[in-house]
Image (cartoon, grey):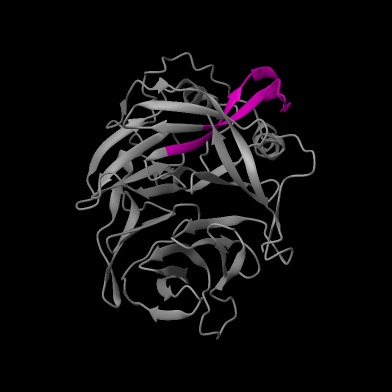
Amino acid sequence: MYGGTYQITFNLHPMLNFRIFVLGFLSFGTILFDSCQTSDKQLPSDFPKVAQTVDFEQGKAGSAVVRKTIEFLDGDQIPFSQVQHLTFDEQSIYLQTKEGQAGVIHVLDRYSHAYKGRIGSSVKGDPNAVLFPFSILPWKNQVLVSENQGMPQFYLFDRQGQKNKTYEMEVSEFQMPNVHFHNVLLKDSTILISKSLSQNGKKAQRLVMRGDRIMQMEDWIDMEELHAPIDSLDSKVLISRLFMFPSYVQDTAFFAIPNNKYLINRYSFKTGNLIESVSLTSIPILHNWYGNKAVPFNLESVAMDQNEHFYFPTVEVIDQRLFESGVLNDLSVRSYIVKVDLRKKQYQLYSLEDVGYVLPIQIIDHQLWCYDQELSQLKVVELVD
């Protein structure tokens, strides 16, 4: 059985991993604090014109409880310092970490979380080698792994970790992808990739799988659907991450969420056209954290379940003066996971008091898998109403 999974046994303040993030900005220069006196229903000026605000009803508050902490893989043999991807299929959980073995994808049993083995190799010349992977995509009982060496390459592996296919690429121009959670979406043989730069005003590069080939198509997702128009070079790098999810309710749709604001866009997977753009800043706790100029806003991860509930990390500032002075404790800040139901226009707050500030990644079997950046741990969390 998997020997590296255990409960936290040491005593660290839950906000420790959030402390370094905040202090790095607070010590950088002059604090520009905006008291945010605007109405919660007023759309912030940097949101796209197409975005709409809606009234969200607050549901019953709850708490997050850590059910399992993973600090090592394969017993105590494989520590990890940074999780880059985590996904799953009917049998397994696939995990890519930023280690010396950059081309290795670790496989855990979906239910016991025991270590099952590896996919890929970081050894040049190995037939299963993958260099600089930027996504893991379960695909028809196999695993599609991407590689970036200036131009993309896609390989199909079986569940035993053997490379079965190397796709012929018909790509004339490829922009560097961003490596982050939910950076690539695969649906109905179409692959969408979050780009580092939006040089042509589009944020997602689109590829299509046709037999043994992968072909380049026209890019999707206009920047002006993600942000207010900016006549500046900043518009190319304004959004560093774009989180993308398939719709489970509307089979012909998908969602895109930029990292620089609380915004959920829904698009057609047939045409790439925008269907709906919803600002979440009418939710008070999200409105206040987004508008707090003491720390530049940066959404590092989002999760979505198959009922299309979205899970956002956020922070409530209790005492602004203590917060700006770098005092991070229960008197100054509290951290939460906000669960958002777009269809019912409801939200719930789950306190992270006993968990610490974590990044939500995936909902697997009704549990929220999160990454603790400061402690380099995976935490399997139950949200208790």
Quadrant the N terminus occupies: bottom right
Q: Whole-percent x and y of residue 206?
A: 30, 60
Q: Is residue 66 left or right of residue 205?
A: right
Q: Whole-percent x and y of residue 165?
A: 39, 80
Report the front residue among 230 and 37.
37
Is residue 162 inside the magenta stretch? no
Report the front residue among 133 and 43.
133
Residue depicted at x 49% and y 52%: 181
Q: Is residue 230 visible?
A: no
Residue depicted at x 30% and y 39%: 225
Q: Whole-percent x and y of residue 246?
A: 34, 50
Q: Tell me which corner region of the image, top left, top right, bottom left or bottom right, holds residue 66.
A: top right
Residue depicted at x 69% and y 45%: 374
Q: Is the residue 78 above or below the residue 194 in the image? A: below
Q: Is residue 151 left or right of residue 97?
A: left
Report the front residue among 303 and 223.
303
Q: Is residue 85 left or right of residue 278?
A: right
Q: Is residue 377 visible?
A: yes
Q: Whole-percent x and y of residue 244?
A: 38, 49
What segment is highlighted magenta in the picture? 310-337
Is residue 327 inside the magenta stretch? yes
Q: Residue furthest right?
A: 10
Q: Is the residue 203 above or below the residue 332 in the image? A: below
Q: Is the residue 211 above or below the residue 243 in the image? A: below
Q: Tell me which corner region of the image, top left, top right, bottom left or bottom right, holds residue 309.
A: top left
Residue depicted at x 77% and y 38%: 12
